[in-house]
Amino acid sequence: MLNLSRNTLRGLAGVAAVAALAAAALPNAQATPTANPAIPVLPQPGETPNQAVSTPPAGEGLTTMASSPTNVVRYNRLYNTPAITPSKCKEVNVSLRTQAGVAAYSTQLWTCMYAAWAVPLKAAGAAYKVKPKLSVHSGTKINTGCGIANNTTGYYCSAGNGVIYIPAAYIMKTWGQNPTYARAWLTQMMSHEYGHHVQYLTGILNASWTRQRAFSTNAARLEESRRRELQASCLGAAYIGANKRYYPMSGGLLTQFNYLISHMGDQPGGVRDHGSPKNHAFWSTAGFNAKHTYTVAGNCNTFNATSTYVA
Ligand SMILES: [Zn+2]
C-alpha cells in the first residue's frame, strides 16, 4: 500500500516537474545537486508490485536451485553469465505524440530486450523463452493482479508470467514538453521494467519479496526494496549500454538519460524505497558501462553490496 500511494504522489509531482523542466534550459547531465530547489522531482519510471503473486516458470537451473531466498538473490547464476550482446536494435524514429507512436517505440524495445536477455537468462538456467506481455495503456487505474498501475509510472507485474505496463498519456504529455527527455524516459522505463522480468525469471524477484516480508523492521524492509529497485535499473542500463552504439544512445539523448538516472530515486522527505539519486546513478552507470570482460549481471549484484551503496 505504501508503494501505491507513493506512486501517485510521485506521478503527480512528475507532471508538474516536467513542465518546469521544459521551461528551463535543457538539463545538463552532471549539473545540479539535488538540494537545489529548482531540480524537478522526477517520476519513477518503474514500480514493482507490492507482492509477488506468481512463481517463476522452472528453467533447467531453477528446479535444482536448492537455496534460501538469500542465496537466490546473492549468488544467483545470473551473476556468472556472459555479457549481454548488443541487440543491434535501433531506436524507432517515431513521434511519441500519439499512443500509436508510444506503442511502436515500446514494442521495438520490448522485442529487442527479449532477444538480448535470452542469452544470459538461458545461461542462468532460467526460462528464457518466457516473454512478458506488453500493455501500452491510457488508463488511470489498471488492476494488474499485483496492484494498481497508474497513468504516470511504468509497472511490472509477474502475474501471468509477466506484464509490463506503459502509461502512454504520460509519455505523450512529456513529448509535448521535451521530446528528447520523453525518449530517454521511455527507454529507461522499458529497460527498468524488463529488469524486473529478468529478476522474476531468475527467482530473484520472489526471493527478494520473501526476504522483505521476513524482515522485522521497516528500515530493513525498505533497504530490501531499494536493493531490488536499484538492481532493476542496473540490469536495464546494462541492456542500454551494450546496445549504445546501435540505438544510438549518444548526444542529446545520452545527456537526458544521464540526467534522468542521476536525479530519479528517493526524493527528500519521501519514502526510502528506491534508493538515493546518487546510488541510482551509481548502479545505472555500473550496468551501462559493463564491459564484456566482466560479467554484466554480476555488476548488478545489489544484494551483495554494503548498505552504503543501497542507501
Ligand atoms: Zn521498479
Image (cartoon, rainbow, N blue to C red):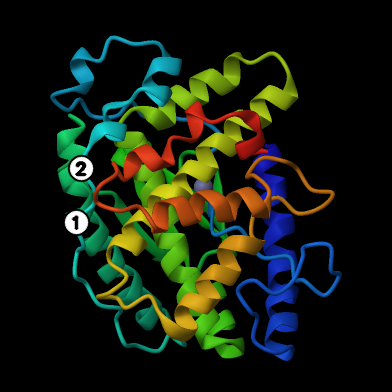
* Residue behind label 2 places its C-beta within 8 angstroms of ligand 1: no
Q: Position of residue 71 (x, y in %)?
A: 39, 16
User: Quick check: marks 1 and 2 in contact, CB under 8 Å?
Assistant: yes
x, y percent for residue 181? 54, 79
Q: Quadrant of residue 58?
A: top left
Residue bearing mark 1: 85
At 17% across and 56% down in the image, what residue appears? 115
219 and 32: which is toward the camera: 32
Between the C-alphas of marks 1 and 2, the distance is 9 Å
Does any portion of residue 30 appear in the rendered image? yes
Label 2: few (<14), some (14–19) or many (≥20) C-alpha neighbours in 10 Å: some
Q: Which residue occupies the foreground of this view, 13 or 280? A: 280
SS at badge 1 = loop
Tell me what residue is drawn at x 19 percent, y 70 percent: 88
| Position of the N terminus by quadrant | top right
In-image side of 52 versus 7 (left or right): left
Residue type at tag 2: Pro
For image coordinates 77% across by 62% down, the residue present is 34
Does residue 168 sit above or below 289 in this rendering? Answer: below
In-front residue for pair 179/35: 35
Q: Residue at x 47, y 88 (%)?
A: 97
Image coords of residue 265 (percent x, y): 65, 53
In the displayed structure, does residue 36 sit left or right of residue 117? Answer: right
Q: Quadrant of residue 225?
A: top right
Q: Compared to 174, does 117 lie above or below?
A: above
- Residue at the disc numbered 2: 82
